């Protein structure tokens, strides 16, 4: 069964799925700045647009574009900035 998630008053939405690769979400973000927390390791791939990301311990923002993946460790918080609408695929490991 697919599960729809909504965060930040509807500015971030995702659909959760389970398949042979594991648990994942496919989502979209409106323009804005957001802080997320993790409970597992996350492999996040940008599928449309680009996303600025500040991972724990980083002092600078890194830009990830369509087709690029970044990895976030479990039990941390990280920040993202979307300057335009962004779509992503997130695999939970």
Image (spheres, grey):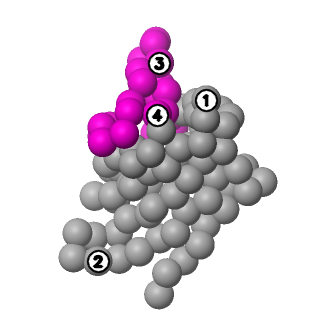
Task: State if disc 1 and disc 3 touch (CB < 8 Å).
Answer: no
List the residue tagged with mark 3: 61
Mark number, residue 83 = 1
Query: Earlier along the polypeptide chain: callout 4 or callout 1?
Result: 4
Query: Earlier along the polypeptide chain: callout 3 or callout 4?
Result: 4
Mark number, residue 19 = 2
Query: Looking at the image, is mark 1 or mark 2 nearer the viewer?
Result: 1
Identify the image quadrant of residue 46. top left
Relative placement, left or right, of 54 versus 28 is left
In the picture, which quadrant includes the C terminus? bottom left
Q: In 3D space, how far apart are the residues under numbered discs 4 and 1 (Cα atoms)?
A: 8 Å
Query: Looking at the image, is mark 3 or mark 4 nearer the viewer?
Result: 4
Task: State if disc 3 and disc 2 touch (CB < 8 Å).
Answer: no
Mark number, residue 28 = none
Query: Looking at the image, is mark 4 or mark 2 nearer the viewer?
Result: 4
List the residue tagged with mark 4: 50
Query: Earlier along the polypeptide chain: callout 4 or callout 2?
Result: 2
Relative placement, left or right, of 87 versus 67 is right
Which span of residues is magenta-colored?
A: 50-78
Q: Residue at x 56, y 53 (%)?
A: 28
Q: In 3D space, how far apart are the residues under numbered discs 1 and 2 (Cα atoms)?
A: 31 Å
Question: Label 3: how many residues lie within 10 Å, few (<14), some (14-19) or many (20+)?
Answer: some
Identify the secondary structure beneath mark 3: loop
Identify the image quadrant of residue 20. bottom left
């Amino acid at each position: 069964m697919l599960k729809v998630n909504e965060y930040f008053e509807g500015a971030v939405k995702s659909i959760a799925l389970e398949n042979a690769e594991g648990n994942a979400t496919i989502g979209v973000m409106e323009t804005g700045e957001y802080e997320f927390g993790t409970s597992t390791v996350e492999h996040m791939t940008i599928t449309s647009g680009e996303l600025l990301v500040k991972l724990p311990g980083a002092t600078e923002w890194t830009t990830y574009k369509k087709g690029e993946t970044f990895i976030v460790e479990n039990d941390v918080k990280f920040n993202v900035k979307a300057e335009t609408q962004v779509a992503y695929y997130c695999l939970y490991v």
